[in-house]
Amino acid sequence: MKSRTRTVTTIVLAAMLAASGISCSKQSDPGAPAVKPKVTVGVLPKLVGIPFFNAFEKGAMEAGKELGIEVVYDGPVTADTAKQVAIVESWIARKFDVIVVAPNDPEAMAPVLKKARQRGIRVLAADSDTDPADREFFVSQATPEAIAKALVEAMVRGIGPSGKFIILTGSLTAANQNIWMDRMEKYRQAHYPNMKNLSSTPKTSEEDQALATQVTIDLLKTYPDLQGLYALTTVALPGAAEALRKEKAFDKVYLTGIGTPNAMRDYVTAGVVKEFVLWNPIDLGYLAVTSAKALLDGKLTRETTHLEAGRLGSIQVIDRVVLLGEPLVFNKNNIDKHDF
Amino acid sequence: MIRIKSLFVSRHSGLLCALTLLLVGFGCASAQFRDPVNLLDRSRLWIEVGLVAVPMTFIIAAGGIDLSVGSLLALSAMVAGLCHRDLHWPLSLAMGMAVLTGTVGGAVNGFAASVLRVPPLVATLATLAIFRGLAMGMSHGQPIGNLPAGFEEWGGFATVGKGTFAPPQQLVLLLLFVALGELILRKTRAGRWTVQLGENEVAARYAAIPVNHVRFGLFLASGVVCGFGAITYMAHYASARPNANIGLELEAIACVIVGGTRITGGSGSVIGTFLALLFLGLLRFGLDMTGVLQQTQTILVGLLVVVTAIFNQWLANRHDRRSSMAFNVTQTEQVI
């Protein structure tokens, strides 16, 4: 009876294979010329469905249309490294020309990016860097030093040069936030040595706004002498602002950080948050796709110092980093000029 | 003899139909899908789920559940990573440590579920949190990288043989493991005990089945497999990560259920679980290759899982009714 079972399985499997084989062989021969003649660029954000990356997508698509190339924008629904790896695997299989990634976790992405480059796919990082060895160029919003300086100066305007603060980040593996925190600490030590960080490890909010609110409420209880709070992701900042509004604590605790104008508008108008820092994510997406095309056309090489990037004009390229520009500081005077 | 044959066919015919449809459909729609290199390479993403789904089939067939597998896998990887990085152990010894950690974790689950009589759902829900917490705390949430290049090479590229049809080594190991699992479940006393325990625990105790030993053994095995899963994970992602495989338990349970194992216990099939793994993996792969966006995929996969599970269950039930008809008739007559 064992052999019977086996025979049946074999027959079924063989039939399946034959069926798929037959139906495929019909297609594969005339199908050959139909393989895309167009350039395809895959853009992989940390996650989809948050305002920052929606704006990023808008810019990427705009550039794709302008340059006449196909842009595929797709990412995980949560900031999930394994899903990002799976997406890159499938883009390798689909033989994209360029892959632009904003990795949640640079180290975990390294093997799959290596594989992509082995298969002849060009790799760029945008928004958040990979290990520089794994990509050709990094399309950066602004230097970490400039962002760190803008954040610390905003905090000093709120709590003075000797206040007590805490940092709320995304996840502990997020490369962007980690490098900003490092530069913020260096800048603080050099210019404001009397400011004090009450928690040596930053608090985490895992790109989850509700969690950021909860963590902030807990912080207010745990650290009654807290004066300032940095929220370093565009999801954490509105979450923390909501906590201050709910607890009516915004006179006591000064909040600043990285945020998008649309998510922060109500809090700025209501006076919960006075200032926050960002760059233009639409321009960043636009620049990422423009750089991808320039890379393919040989206009972006190791010798390039300036890149002509369509409506953005001439963009600086230093040490394999394509630099969008200086960070913007948003407050109630300029926030209404921006819609993203 | 004929009954056995029809039992096998109808148990999995729903899934086999679905798989055939999938292969033909996506095979025609996408040249990348029918490229064997792509197809085989893709299987590297399923290894961990496939591994833990095998003992999960046993545990569910025995009327239990193990929610802690994802956390235990991450913990095993972190322990191995720390041994390698901080204690400078050679890689092989560190990997042994991963398996040992998995074993200890599995023993903790088994002890709680058998000796302490904590329901498996509660016990492993607790260890789901505890193991993850330990993995996170061990390195303050930081991943551990810098593993030897050869190891990474194995995770991403090693195949059995060369050429277009050379399968990844991990896939071959998984296939062997599935075959072993099916053999144990069908042909050994341990397998029979597992199913009898799931069918009726009281009856199993009266039948002098060492219920506690069986239950402990199943959770222990699940832990050991998590340890091995940690090794393939570390090789594939070139690092140990405290947030590895969050939700692995749900993916494994989905494979088990779609594969036709009864969620309340009493029947199970490792082959069914493996076919379900293929189905879910190929479905995702096909959707990827035809350019369906992730958000849409999540919905589609959910819907298709429900439809396939219902279809499969319906076929299995219809068959079970038919094959047990004769038995039922005699039983009814006796009652009357």
Image (cartoon, grey):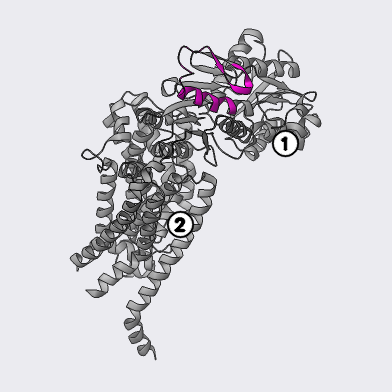
Residue B288 in the figure: left or right of residue B10 = right
In the image, residue A299 lies in the stretch drawn in magenta: yes
Which residue in the rendered view is the most extreme toward the bottom?
A: B336
Which residue in the rendered view is the most extreme toward the top?
A: A190
Q: Nearer the viewer, residue B146 or A31?
A: A31
Q: Nearer the viewer, residue A74 or B191?
A: A74
Q: Give the total of numbered labels.
A: 2
The residue tagged 1 is A242
Residue drawn at point x = 69 percent, y = 20 percent: A328
Relative image position of residue B45 (x, y in whole percent): 38, 42
Q: Above or below — where is A275 with respect to B217?
A: above
* Range shown magenta: A286-314
Residue drawn at point x = 30 percent, y = 30 percent: B153
- Crowding at mark 1 (Cα within 10 Å: few <14, some 14-19, many 20+): many
Q: Is any atom of residue B62 visible in this view?
A: no
Q: Secondary structure at mark 1?
A: helix
Q: Above or below — where is B174 with respect to A270?
A: below
Q: Chain of mark 1?
A: A
How far is mark 2 from mark 1, CA to CA?
40 Å
Q: Is any atom of residue B170 visible in this view?
A: yes
Label 1 sits on what residue type?
A: Glu
In the image, residue A318 lies in the stretch drawn in magenta: no
Relative image position of residue A105 (x, y in whole percent): 48, 30
Q: Nearer the viewer, residue A215 or B209?
A: A215
For the residues carrying marks 2 and 1, which lies nearer the camera in this image?
A: 1
Residue A235 in the figure: left or right of residue A172 = right
Residue drawn at point x = 23 percent, y = 39 percent: B163
Q: Chain of mark 2?
A: B
The residue tagged 2 is B119
Label 2 sits on what residue type?
A: Pro
Q: Secondary structure at mark 2?
A: loop
